[in-house]
Image (cartoon, rainbow, N blue to C red):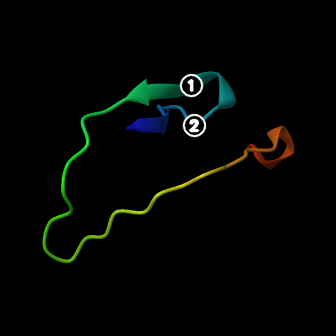
Amino acid sequence: MKAMRLRHPPKLENLTVEDLDSRAPGAGEVKVRVHAASLVAGEER
């Protein structure tokens, strides 16, 4: 699965797209399929 990770310090330059192993959710967890997501540069804090 693909994951967007924001490394420390939390700046847009530290945002990366990575491939992760997909695993089954554990007790008390859910897996959510995301079809689209966005990040607006003006939302950086």
| SS assignment at label 2 | loop
In this view, the residue in front, 36 or 44, is: 36
**Residue 14: x percent and y percent?**
56, 25
Q: Residues within 10 Å of mark 2 (few under 14, many from 20)?
A: few
**Left or right: residue 22 compared with residue 9:** left
Q: Residues within 10 Å of mark 1 (few under 14, many from 20)?
A: few
Q: Residue at x 67, y 49 (%)?
A: 37
In the rendering, which numbered label is found on residue 33?
A: none
**Which amino acid does the dot numbered 2 rest on?**
Pro
**Residue 33: x percent and y percent?**
47, 58
Q: Give the number of callouts.
A: 2
**Residue 20: x percent and y percent?**
31, 33
| SS assignment at label 1 | helix
**Depicted 7 relative to depicted 27: above or below:** above
Is the residue under label 1 in contact with that under label 2 (CB below 8 Å)? yes
* Residue at numbered disc 2: 10
Q: Which of the 4 image quarters holds residue 12?
A: top right
Q: Residue at x 21, y 62 (%)?
A: 25
* Residue at numbered disc 1: 14
Q: Residue at x 45, y 38 (%)?
A: 3
**Which amino acid does the dot numbered 1 rest on?**
Asn
**Depicted 12 relative to depicted 44: above or below:** above
In this view, the residue in front, 36 or 5, is: 36
